[in-house]
Image: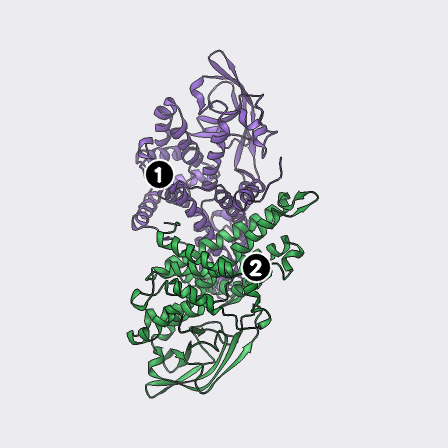
């Protein structure tokens, strides 16, 4: 046991911090801020391709899959640093779907799509939820039906985030309507978002983040679009979600926000000339957030370590997701109290804005991941069953 | 970044768990309830000594295993898991560790072999009434007397003070703080039994012009505060490790109970309200575990771990409180029944929460470091 980074890992972090410091030009920052932290703009794309060309995407993937062969710990450092820099990294593509394609995909996926992902030239959105299938995902109805040599796909997905600028959708469909257990009749397809039968309407959210409803109308694809085994999709979904959960709760952005609020409170004076940061209640809030960040950091690092050892534990992945998502909400509230009224002033206001309105916006977006990526009730069910061997109710 | 145990760490944990789970039974623990006897199982103490565990972090030249603070913390976690009636924290962490780190070779040779063999007992007086800062004694003062000191003052919360061979304590002196090893049988010392919730008596120690010879001085005025800081951080981390064992066991007892107890014809664990409260305990215990291991690991390599120890202690306080009450609650009446082993865990969770400062005090100290620019996220 040594809960410290190696000198090489610390050096990598320094290198990345300097790299992203240069990459994130004010123009790119502005564009990302306009796109509500989602990316997709022209400068964002150029930057992603540059990262690909410089070999940073897939840093922790095995060399035989086209990566740099570093461990998931280095990969996690990479994601942490890029998120700290404020670049909306398409981690669903690079960290969760990409590795799945590299490990379980066919020749086309491996030789054509994966290299494009690693080059920053291909983006994938995720199509799981439907109007009638959310937490009970296995109830999904979007279908792929065999017709000659092809598959015909019909249905609707909800919350297909980023789909409006992605190239493919990683789509969960029903291929066996008669399977005795409903999760055994599901397969994964890669569906091209430029197909004439593909359409998308925006869903605008509380936090200004755009997501989508996507529609699949008689889309015809061939066998090469099937990922993994026919009716073997459930395993890919759960393994993808385990990877996604870690990226969702990355500690980087909150650590940066904490540092900025501390700095701001140290430079802000009250009417009597004393510093805001010297107020007892301010120190109390800041200390609470600092304590929470430390635990989140360790929970994430342990996960990255477990992935590098091949011992990723189901309960631990859910611990990270529940703890991280609920801590973020608490952290934004506590930091917002420190900033005071200014924590409700929106970005680009004529006056009164603090830290580019980040807290105002984060407070509105924070609720997404307590239910997104697998709702926390289900995560707690998993923790109670897989971590404590408590029997669960049948559903 | 390595969260796994080395071979030797795994062995220490297994050995400690084996001895403690066999020897510490509810029957044997009951012998100390209501202060029937000093809460010290000397037979178990000898077994731990023979197994080498009392010397786990002492150098081989002193009869120890030669391992470090991480292994010691893992041993203490097991003591917490079994709530064994043995004074490992005051003896090994607060007293023996600083003697090994800062003491003269004469001082080390005099005390450490006996520490490992269990033949001597050391303890420490870290707090004063209204002053929980070990490195800044305010009620205890010393004056030079030849090449030794004369000490007067008041210490509180001193475990095993009556049976210890030496009590490590700090005193304010002209030019700083001195750290002394005081013989409780010295003239001028009086001890009062303070009956604590856990049935482990914590003594109040009054010193009146007590003579301490030069041979019993661990650190002089310029080094004393740093020595106290050093041992205070390690004692705090040890309390976190003990708390980790206490809460982990308490949680697992609760999980087993909810997987056996039926109401409305079904196991109560199948109710989400029950399963989710247990899941919250699991998240809490994991946070305490990781913060404790991080603190231990940093202290083992002598890194500056002030922030990390304070943070771990906040978790120890909060998690102790939450897991203790969740365990009680989910057990229903069974949890408070003294014929069932949970109730003692509740007392120890509280003990570890409060010793050397509860969460509010730790948060205030961390908050002050944040304001001073000493606790930014890396």
State the residue lying farthest toward the right.
B264
Reply above or below: B284 against A189.
Answer: below
Q: Is residue A118 left or right of residue A211?
A: left
The residue lying at 35 percent from left, 38 percent from top is A60
Q: Position of residue B268 (x, y in %)?
A: 64, 46
Chain containing mark 1: A
Residue tagged by mark 1?
Answer: A60
**Residue B138, numbered circle:** none
Q: Is residue B352 left or right of residue B98?
A: right
The residue lying at 53 percent from left, 30 percent from top is A128
Same chain, labels 1 and 2 = no
Q: Position of residue B50 (x, y in %)?
A: 39, 64
- Would you call the spot at circle 2 few (<14 residues within 10 Å), some (14-19), or many (20 or more)? some
Chain letter of the purple region: A
Would you identify the image quadrant in which residue A20 lies? top left
Q: Position of residue A93 (x, y in %)?
A: 43, 33
Residue tagged by mark 2?
Answer: B321
Q: Is residue A28 visible?
A: yes
Secondary structure, mark 2, is: helix
Chain B: its colour in the image is green
Disc 1 to disc 2, C-alpha distance = 40 Å
Chain containing mark 2: B
């Amino acid at each position: 046991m040594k809960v410290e980074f190696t000198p090489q890992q610390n050096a990598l972090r320094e290198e990345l911090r300097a790299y992203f410091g240069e990459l994130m030009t004010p123009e790119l920052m502005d564009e990302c801020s306009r796109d509500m932290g989602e990316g997709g703009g022209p400068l964002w794309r150029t930057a992603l391709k540059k990262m690909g060309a410089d070999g940073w995407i897939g840093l922790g993937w095995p060399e035989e899959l086209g990566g740099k062969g570093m461990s998931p710990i280095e990969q996690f450092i990479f994601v942490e640093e890029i998120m700290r820099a404020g670049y909306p990294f398409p981690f669903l593509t690079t960290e969760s779907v990409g590795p799945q394609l590299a490990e379980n995909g066919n020749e086309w996926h491996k030789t054509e799509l994966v290299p494009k992902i690693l080059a920053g030239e291909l983006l994938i959105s995720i199509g799981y939820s439907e109007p009638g299938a959310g937490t009970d995902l296995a109830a999904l109805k979007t279908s792929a039906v065999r017709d000659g040599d092809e598959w015909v796909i019909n249905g609707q997905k909800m919350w297909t985030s980023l789909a409006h600028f992605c190239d493919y959708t990683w789509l969960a469909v029903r291929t066996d309507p008669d399977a005795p257990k409903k999760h055994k009749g599901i397969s994964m397809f890669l569906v091209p978002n430029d197909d004439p039968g593909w359409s998308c309407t925006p869903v605008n959210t509380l936090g200004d983040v755009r997501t989508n409803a996507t529609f699949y109308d008689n889309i015809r694809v061939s066998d090469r679009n099937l990922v993994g085994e026919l009716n073997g999709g459930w395993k890919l979904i759960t393994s993808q979600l385990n990877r996604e959960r870690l990226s969702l709760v990355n500690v980087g952005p909150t650590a940066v926000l904490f540092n900025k609020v501390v700095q701001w409170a140290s430079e802000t004076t009250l009417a009597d000339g004393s510093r805001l940061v010297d107020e007892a209640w301010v120190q109390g809030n800041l200390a609470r957030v600092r304590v929470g960040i430390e635990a989140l950091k360790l929970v994430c690092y342990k996960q990255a370590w477990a992935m590098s050892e091949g011992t990723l534990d189901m309960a631990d992945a859910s611990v990270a997701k529940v703890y991280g998502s609920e801590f973020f909400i608490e952290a934004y509230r506590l930091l917002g109290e420190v900033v005071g009224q200014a924590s409700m002033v929106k970005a680009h206001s004529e006056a009164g804005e603090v830290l580019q309105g980040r807290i105002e916006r984060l407070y509105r977006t924070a609720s997404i991941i307590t239910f997104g990526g697998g709702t926390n009730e289900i995560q707690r069910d998993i923790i109670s069953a897989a971590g404590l061997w408590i029997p669960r109710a049948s559903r | 970044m390595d969260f796994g145990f080395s071979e030797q760490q795994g062995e220490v944990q297994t050995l400690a768990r084996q001895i403690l789970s066999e020897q510490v039974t509810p029957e044997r623990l009951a012998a100390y309830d209501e202060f029937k006897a000093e809460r010290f199982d000397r037979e178990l103490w000898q077994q731990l000594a023979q197994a080498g565990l009392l010397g786990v972090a002492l150098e081989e030249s002193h009869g120890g295993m030669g391992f470090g603070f991480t292994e010691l913390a893992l041993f203490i976690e097991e003591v917490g898991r079994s709530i064994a009636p043995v004074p490992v924290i005051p003896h090994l962490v607060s007293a023996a560790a600083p003697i090994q780190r800062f003491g003269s070779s004469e001082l080390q040779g005099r005390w450490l072999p006996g520490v490992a063999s269990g033949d001597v007992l050391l303890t420490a007086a870290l707090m004063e009434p209204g002053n929980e800062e070990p490195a800044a004694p305010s009620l205890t003062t010393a004056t030079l007397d030849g090449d030794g000191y004369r000490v007067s003052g008041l210490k509180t919360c001193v475990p095993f003070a009556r049976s210890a061979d030496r009590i490590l304590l700090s005193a304010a002196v002209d030019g700083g703080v001195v750290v002394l090893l005081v013989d409780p049988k010295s003239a001028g010392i009086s001890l009062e039994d303070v009956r604590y919730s856990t049935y482990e008596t914590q003594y109040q120690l009054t010193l009146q012009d007590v003579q301490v010879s030069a041979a019993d001085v661990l650190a002089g005025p310029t080094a004393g505060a740093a020595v106290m800081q050093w041992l205070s951080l390690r004692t705090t981390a040890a309390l976190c490790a003990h708390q980790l064992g206490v809460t982990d066991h308490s949680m697992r007892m609760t999980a087993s109970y909810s997987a056996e107890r039926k109401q409305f014809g079904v196991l109560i664990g199948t109710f989400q309200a029950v399963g989710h409260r247990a899941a919250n305990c699991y998240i809490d215990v994991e946070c305490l575990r990781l913060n404790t291991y991080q603190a231990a690991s940093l202290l083992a390599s002598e890194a500056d771990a002030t922030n990390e120890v304070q943070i771990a202690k906040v978790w120890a306080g909060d998690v102790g409180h939450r897991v203790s009450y969740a365990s009680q609650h989910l057990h229903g009446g069974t949890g408070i029944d003294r014929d069932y082993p949970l109730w003692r865990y509740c007392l120890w969770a509280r003990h570890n929460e409060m010793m050397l400062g509860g969460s509010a005090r730790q948060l205030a100290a961390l908050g002050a470091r944040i304001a001073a620019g000493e606790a930014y996220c890396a």
